[in-house]
Amino acid sequence: MKISLIAAVGKNNEIGKGNDLVFKLPADMKHFKDITTGHIVIMGRKTYESIGKPLPNRKNIIVTRDKKYKSYGVDVVYSLEEAIKLAKINPNPSLALPLSGAGENTEIFIIGGGEIYKEVMKFVDKIYLTEINATDKKADTFFPEIIPVVFGETKREHHKKDEKNLYDYDFVEYERF
Ligand SMILES: NC(=O)c1ccc[n+]([C@@H]2O[C@H](COP(=O)([O-])OP(=O)(O)OC[C@H]3O[C@@H](n4cnc5c(N)ncnc54)[C@H](OP(=O)(O)O)[C@@H]3O)[C@@H](O)[C@H]2O)c1
């Protein structure tokens, strides 16, 4: 199973501010939903609490070091290794709605936040990055460097800002060489 990462970054690699997103583009929210629906999402406890509920139609795995942490509708694990192992062992998510195509083609998505992204860069196969043409000096969480000898850009789709999306943005894909 492929292990991918998905994130949206500003020009200075900003991803978070006050445990929330920095930039909220409806087009990026849709892109995230389209790409991850039917698959497995792994996230840090802070990102999960920022979202506030399990993401529907996806198996949600939450990573925490708190052995007492519990939340309804998600799987809680205590390391990233455990998260990947759980995702691989049980590709058929225990969801109210059946997933189409769960199995061999199921992708594991690491969806943040900053602490988790830093830890997974050494083993992810693919990065789906929304590059937003904006900056925010108040950001407090950042995306790690994508090392050019490790990952190559394989796709880029440019979009102009519009009445709903306040900044230009690119949907970019990077793959491990
Ligand atoms: N722009 C984007 O694409 C995007 C995506 C996601 C999130 N975000 C933003 O990123 C920010 C949150 O990121 P963050 O770095 O503060 O937190 P985070 O990565 O979401 O979560 C960190 C927490 O995950 C747990 N954790 C991390 N590594 C672990 C490990 N190896 N083993 C077990 N548990 C581990 C710990 O939980 P415990 O403290 O419970 O032990 C840790 O405090 C928010 O602002 C959010 O909105 C942005």
Image: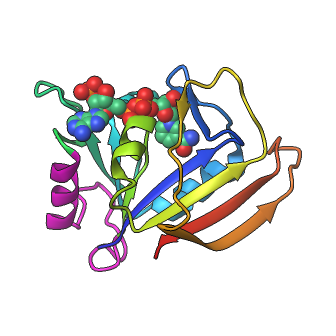
84 sits to left or right of 16: left
21 sits to left or right of 177: right
**Residue located 64% across and 54% down the image:** 130
**Residue located 16% across and 26% down the image:** 66
Foreground pick, 74 / 177: 177
Image quarter where the N terminus lies is: bottom left
Q: Where ligand 1 lies, by quadrant?
A: top left
- Residue 105 image-quadrant placement: bottom left
- Residue 78 image-quadrant placement: top left
Q: Residue furthest bottom?
A: 104
34 sits to left or right of 83: right
Q: Predominant secondary structure in magenta?
A: loop
**Residue located 43% across and 48% down the image:** 111
- Classify 150 as above or below 52: below
**Residue located 37% across and 74% down the image:** 100
64 sits to left or right of 166: left
Foreground pick, 95 / 132: 132
Q: Is residue 48 visible?
A: no
Q: Which residues are magenta?
A: 80-106
Q: Does the stretch in magenta take in 153?
A: no
Q: Is residue 175 visible?
A: yes
Horizontal and vertical percent position of residue 45: 32, 32
Horizontal and vertical percent position of residue 38: 39, 64
Foreground pick, 4 / 56: 4
